[in-house]
Image (cartoon, rainbow, N blue to C red):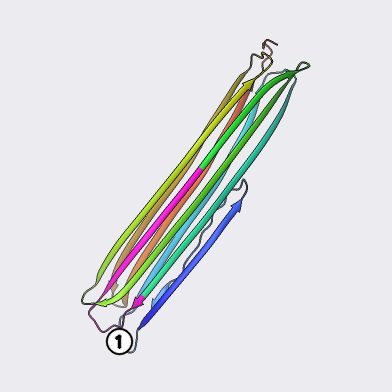
């Protein structure tokens, strides 16, 4: 019995400031009992990838003076999942075992850039605060699985797991206080960039047949918490 299967699924997620999870499942492959009494072989392949983009932006003004605040935000978030599986089975059942090889590759890339600009000025006794926040986040997950099963003299399992994570982060903060204002500006940025890849491969024998289980999990996240606090208390020197 021989079967050569190739299944490729791609998905691209392009969204704004939204926290979203994307999962792609691949079905089970069954090599049923043949007319020569070959053993049943089940191959379970589970590839689970998750993307997360979430950013929180807050602006707080301290003081009772007349204040006008302008906040300009630009958020660009992109996520892409590419999962590829290749299963090749040639198991006629005439031998005493199976030779199985599993090759997996997991590549995760997370890029995050955060720019925060704050300008404080005074016009006719009114304090103007301009806040600009620019966030760019790109997340990409590529996951490949190659499974080959052949008749052999004994049961054997050869595995090769390749995992590659790449994280890039850049934060730029610029504060400008004009007109001689005695103003305190505090900018707190708590970024979280996470990239986790895990793989588990196992083979078992039972009276009803053999089981080959391959599980790939990936999580890539770019999360940012940005808080801008401007103190324009009454004791400012104008």
In front of the other: 222 or 113: 113
> Can I make out residue 32 in this image?
no
Q: Position of residue 154 (x, y in %)?
A: 21, 74
> Can I make out residue 8 in this image?
yes
Q: Position of residue 166 (x, y in %)?
A: 43, 46
Q: Residue at x 41, y 66 (%)?
A: 45
Give the crowd class for mark 1: few <14, some 14-19, many >=20 residues within 10 Å: few
Q: Which residues are magenta?
A: 89-111
Q: Which residue is mark 1?
A: 37
Which residue occupies the extreme right position in the image?
124
Q: Residue at x 46, y 70 (%)?
A: 7
Position above or below: 31 against 177: below
Q: Is residue 74 left or right of residue 153?
A: right
Which residue occupies the extreme left position in the image?
153
Location of residue 156 (image quadrant): bottom left
Q: Position of residue 152 (x, y in %)?
A: 24, 76
Location of residue 59 (image quadrant): top right
Q: Is residue 51 left or right of residue 206?
A: right
Q: Position of residue 62 (x, y in %)?
A: 65, 21
Magenta-colored segment: predominant secondary structure: strand
Position above or below: 186 against 223: above
Q: Quadrant of the N terminus?
A: bottom left
Q: Residue at x 51, y 57 (%)?
A: 81
Question: Does the stretch in magenta take in 99?
Answer: yes
Question: Does the stretch in magenta take in 55?
Answer: no
Report helix, strand or loop for mark 1: loop
Q: Residue at x 58, y 34 (%)?
A: 115
């Amino acid at each position: 019995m021989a079967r050569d299967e190739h299944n490729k699924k791609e998905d691209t997620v392009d969204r704004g400031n939204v926290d979203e999870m994307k999962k792609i499942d691949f079905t089970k492959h069954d090599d049923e009992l043949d007319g020569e009494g070959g053993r049943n072989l089940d191959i379970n392949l589970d590839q689970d990838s998750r993307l997360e983009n979430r950013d929180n932006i807050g602006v707080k003004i301290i003081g009772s003076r007349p204040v006008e605040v302008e906040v300009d935000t630009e958020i660009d978030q992109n996520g892409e999942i590419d999962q590829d599986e290749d299963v090749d089975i040639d198991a006629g059942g005439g031998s005493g075992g199976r030779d199985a090889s599993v090759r997996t590759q997991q590549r995760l890339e997370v890029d995050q850039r955060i720019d925060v600009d704050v300008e404080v000025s005074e016009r006719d006794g009114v304090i103007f605060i301009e806040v600009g926040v620019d966030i760019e986040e790109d997340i990409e997950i590529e996951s490949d699985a190659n499974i080959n099963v052949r008749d052999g003299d004994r049961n054997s399992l050869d595995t090769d797991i390749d995992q590659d994570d790449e994280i890039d982060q850049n934060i730029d903060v610029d504060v400008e206080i004009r007109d001689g204002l005695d103003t305190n500006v505090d900018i707190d940025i708590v970024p979280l960039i996470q990239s986790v890849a895990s793989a588990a491969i196992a083979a078992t024998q039972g009276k009803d047949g053999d089981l080959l289980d391959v599980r790939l999990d990936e999580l890539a996240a770019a999360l940012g918490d940005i808080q801008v606090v401007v103190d324009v208390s009454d004791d400012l020197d104008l």
